[in-house]
Amino acid sequence: MNKAVDTHCHLQMMPFDGDREQVIERSLESLAWMVVIGDGIVGSADTLKLLRPRIYGTVGFHPYHAAEYDDDAESRLEEFAGTPGIVAVGETGLDYHNEFASRTQQRACFERQLALAVRLRLPAVIHSRDADDDTFAILRDQVPRLRGCILHCFGGSVDFAEKCLELGCYISFAGNVTFPKAELLREAARRVPPDRLLAETDSPYLAPQPVRGKRCEPQYVLHTLQYLASLKSVNADTLIRQITENACAAYNLPPVSLLSAPDECP
């Protein structure tokens, strides 16, 4: 069976405090590997504690915390990024839906983290919500200098998706693409070519429709992968193989042998 991956989860968050190791064990029975995403100083530090074979991580400041980003925070992130198993900077970006920091603060935090990713020669994981134009304006200048760029939990317009694809970004879809009222999101997913497509859970959020209402876990990415395969009218195993290859390329990880035992995965 082809090995799937979860390119974006938050196993360090509080909803997993009671059974984190059990969730990890269940998930790694189904997946080749997963990436735990940092979202601030505390979240990034907690991510470091979870790194092990087949669990990678990122360090970054979510736009919710942009007002807290300063020279000291950047220095801490740079220190964290030197830990083996850290594969990207992020998540970073703009969120104009929930403006917990001003737009000016968010843009400054975003631009500084992209510059950090360039300096560290790491890809960047991007959060963009209700901010297509400003996110693209910043990415247009920075993506050519980055080692890679992932638009996570994509929720923008088809036009935004196509512009980001022209820049060479990967576009990742979470469980909300399966929701009944997500037709615009599905149209964007249809437009993403197979070699630029990723899938994620964003767990503990956005459990896909078959398990909607439950706490999302990394192995639930399999529901989203099956749905994307149906949406794009392709064989599920073929799509899983392609997305796993894309994920390895996006995070600059060694290729996964899709027929290997889990213990042989990177």
Image (cartoon, rainbow, N blue to C red):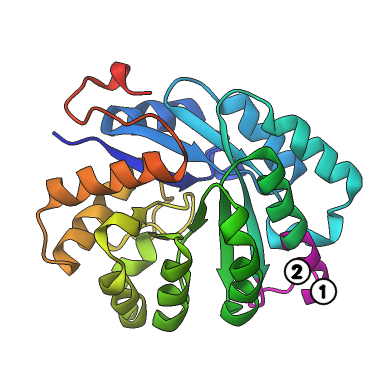
Residue at 32% x, 23% y: name it. 265
With respect to residue 190, does 34 lie above or below? above
- 183 vs 120, left or right, is left
Query: In the image, which residues are magenta?
Result: 95-110
Q: Is residue 13 magenta?
A: no
Residue at 29% x, 79% y: name it. 187
Indicate the position of residue 259 as horizontal and vertical percent values.
16, 27
With respect to residue 146, does 258 lie above or below? above
**How far apart are the two marked residues, 1 and 2, measured between alpha carbons?**
5 Å
Which image quadrant for residue 162? bottom left
Question: Which numbered disc covers residue 104?
Answer: 1
Question: Which numbered disc covers residue 22?
Answer: none
Indicate the position of residue 104 as horizontal and vertical percent values.
82, 74
Q: How many marks?
A: 2
Q: Which residue is at the far right?
A: 71
Question: Which numbered disc covers residue 107?
Answer: 2
At mark 1, the secondary structure is helix
Residue at 62% x, 49% y: name it. 90
| Other-residue count near label 2 (Cα within 10 Å), few / some / many at <14 / 14–19 / ≥20 | many
Indicate the position of residue 115 as horizontal and vertical percent values.
73, 52
The residue nearer to you, when weighing 153 against 28, is: 153
With respect to residue 210, does 74 lie above or below? above
Indicate the position of residue 62 as horizontal and vertical percent values.
68, 56
Pick the quarter of the image with the C terminus: top left
At mark 2, the secondary structure is helix
Q: What kind of residue is marked 2?
A: Arg
Q: What kind of residue is marked 1?
A: Thr
Residue at 25% x, 59% y: name it. 194
